[in-house]
Every structure is written in structure tokens, then in C-alpha cells.
Image (cartoon, rainbow, N blue to C red):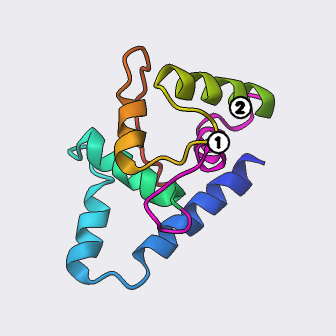
Amino acid sequence: MKSTHHWLCKLRLLRMVDGLNFKDFVAFLSTFSAKASLRQKIELIFKVYDIDGKGRVTFKDLLEVLRDLTGSFMSEEKREQVLAKVLEEAGYTRDCTLSLDDFIQIIDHPGLKMEVEVPID
């Protein structure tokens, strides 16, 4: 199952670079640098899971992020519980659609410690 999720993530990344000019492509690649800021990495993650490109993500989209991050380490039921709790503590519900600013607010929420890595394998 984990390989399927990584494949889908890679497919989303490929769709993001399709049609980029050179300058935009270099900017995209810079996100994978160790020098990239946390905000740059969070913005990339947000764009990957903003499947329709409308600048909003749903509970289902965020669950996909968590699924990619945890793989088989966590059950689907536990992922839903964890995500619902994180959203609730940040003042959101599972029915909310989140903008990039909302997404960043959740990631920056006190008590939520997260290291963001952009996988390149």
C-alpha cells in the first residue's frame, strides 16, 4: 500500500512541473534543497495535495498527506482520529476546507511538533 501512495505523490509532483518554464522549474526544485525554508516545503506539500488546484484542501486531502507520512505504521482509523484531534485543537473541524494560510496555522500550532521532509526517492 505504501508504494501506491508514494507513486501517487510522485504523479502529483510530475503534474505540478508539467508546463513550467525554466525559472519556475528551478524554483520548484529549490524546495528540495536543505536550504529551503519550512514555509517553502509546507507550500509545496499543500500544492501537492490541493488536487484540483483551487487553493483549498479537505480532510480527505489531509488524510492522504498523513497516510503518505505514516505508511503502514498507523491504521486508517488512528490516522482519522489523530487528524481530527489536530484540526480540533487548531480550531477546525473535519468538514472545513483549508487555505494555505489555514494549513500553515495548523502546522505551526503550538504542541504540534513536525519535521517536514520532501521525499525524492
- What is the span of residues highlighted in magenta in the rendered image? 51-75
**Which residue is located at x 64 percent, y 61 percent?**
8
Q: Is residue 26 left or right of residue 96?
A: left
State if disc 1 and disc 2 touch (CB < 8 Å): yes
Q: Nearer the viewer, residue 40 or 22?
A: 40
Residue kind at label 1, given as amino acid type: Leu
Residue 93 lies in the magenta-colored region: no
Residue 93's place in the image compared with 89, above or below, is below
Hey, which residue is sitting farthest top in the picture?
Answer: 111
SS assignment at label 1: helix
Q: Position of residue 45 (x, y in %)?
A: 44, 51
Q: Position of residue 16 (x, y in %)?
A: 44, 71
Q: Is residue 44 left or right of residue 61?
A: left
* Helix, strand or loop for the magenta stretch, by majority: helix
Residue 59 lies in the magenta-colored region: yes
Residue kind at label 2, given as amino acid type: Glu
Residue 63, disc: 1
Residue 80, disc: 2
